[in-house]
């Protein structure tokens, strides 16, 4: 049963990795489009890019949490009457209140969700810093060319 729990956790994690990669590609496309077309007001552009990137990535994380909650529903991992979205949020964000725990036969899915969340948040952090760096580089290049 432990191997099956790990396989389910890996499958859900893989779905979330795909979601995150699609959102990352969308963010990069947006940054390129805006950076190539924008000029002037560099501070405003930089701030706007960072806010847009963070919001887009938050939508990705929320969708990933929904995927976990649907997986919990499908496998019956949470005790009857539990709020699955709340349970998924607590696990994915590694908040770990401990007020809802998986049923005994699915104890590994909570830590698997937490591992997935940590990885996705790290990835998002890297994307945010890359957007910041590329936007600053683009602004410097534009300022130098004037």
Image (cartoon, helix red, strand yellow):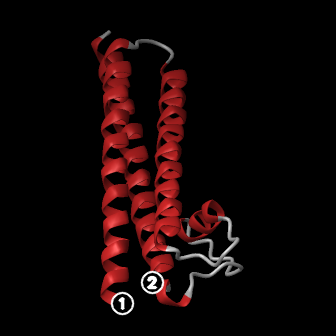
- Secondary element at image label 2: loop
Q: Position of residue 118 (x, y in %)?
A: 45, 67
Query: Which residue appears at 61% of the width and 60% of the height?
Result: 85
Please name whichever residue, 54 or 1, is drawn nearer the observer in this view of the structure: 1
Query: Which residue appears at 46% of the width and 57% of the height?
Result: 67
Is 81 above or below relative to 27?
below
Residue 142: image quadrant is top left
Q: Position of residue 68 (x, y in %)?
A: 48, 62
Q: Residues within 10 Å of mark 1 (few under 14, many from 20)?
A: few
Q: Position of residue 96 (x, y in %)?
A: 62, 76
Q: Which mark is residue 2?
A: 1
Would residue 38 appear left or right of 29 to someone viewing this image? right
Residue furthest to the top in view is 146
- Secondary element at image label 1: helix
Q: Which mark is residue 73?
A: none
Q: Label 2 belongs to which residue?
A: 108
């Amino acid at each position: 049963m432990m191997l099956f729990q790990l396989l389910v956790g890996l499958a859900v994690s893989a779905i979330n990795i795909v979601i995150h990669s699609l959102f990352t590609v969308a963010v990069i496309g947006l940054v390129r489009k805006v950076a190539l077309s924008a000029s002037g007001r560099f501070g405003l552009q930089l701030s706007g890019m960072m806010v847009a990137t963070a919001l887009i990535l938050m939508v990705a994380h929320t969708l990933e949490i929904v995927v976990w909650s649907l997986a919990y529903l499908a496998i019956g991992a949470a005790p009857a009457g539990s709020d699955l979205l709340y349970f998924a949020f607590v696990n994915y964000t590694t908040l770990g209140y401990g007020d809802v725990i998986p049923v005994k036969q699915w104890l590994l899915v909570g830590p698997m969700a937490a591992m997935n969340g940590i990885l996705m948040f790290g990835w998002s952090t890297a994307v945010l810093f890359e957007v910041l760096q590329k936007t600053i580089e683009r602004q410097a290049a534009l300022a130098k060319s004037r």
